[in-house]
Amino acid sequence: MGFSYKNSKGLTYHLHQKGRLFYFSKDPKGSIELPSGYKVVENKRTGLPMLKKK
């Protein structure tokens, strides 16, 4: 099972990768682990998770 993140609204998102692009989706199928050197931040307005370099 890959990395999952539960946001402040109670929704669970799973981390995916397509090429060099990382994105979060509600679908757990094909999720990946959190890459080293990154952390998860949440958009305060929408509640969507994003990756940010440490």
Image: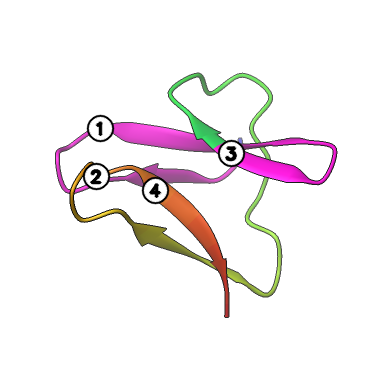
Residue under circle 4? 49
The residue identified by callout 3 is 23
Q: Residues within 10 Å of mark 3 (few under 14, many from 20)?
A: some
**Based on the displayed image, in which of its 4 quarters is residue 42 positioned?**
bottom left
Numbered disc in front, either 1 or 3: 3
How far is the residue under mark 1 from the one under mark 3? 15 Å
Find disc 2 in the rendering and name its residue: 47
Which residue is depicted at the point 39% across and 48% down?
49
Of helix, strand and loop, which one carries label 1? loop
In three-dimensional space, the C-alpha distance between marks 4 and 2, rounded to whole angstroms, equals 6 Å
Indicate the quadrant containing the N terminus: top left, top right, bottom left or bottom right: top right
Residues at circles 3 and 2 in contact by the CB criterion of under 8 Å: no
Closer to the observer: label 2 or label 1? 2
**Amino acid, disc 1:** Leu
Q: Amino acid at mark 3?
A: Tyr
- Of residue 9 and residue 20, the one placed in the foreground of this image is 20
Q: Earlier in the sequence, mark 1 or mark 3?
A: 1
Image quadrant occupied by the C terminus: bottom right
Single out the mark in the foreground, 1 or 4: 4
Labels 2 and 1: the sequence-earlier one: 1
**Left or right: where does residue 49 sit relative to residue 46?**
right
Say whether disc 3 or disc 2 marks the residue closer to the N-terminus. 3
- Tell me the residue at 29%/53% (across/down): 43
The scheme the figure's colours follow is rainbow
- Position of residue 13 in the picture relative to residue 29 (left or right): left
The amino acid at mark 4 is: Pro
Does 15 sit left or right of 20 as displayed? left
Question: Where is residue 50 drawn, in percent x and y?
Answer: 46, 52
What residue sits right under mark 1 in the picture?
11
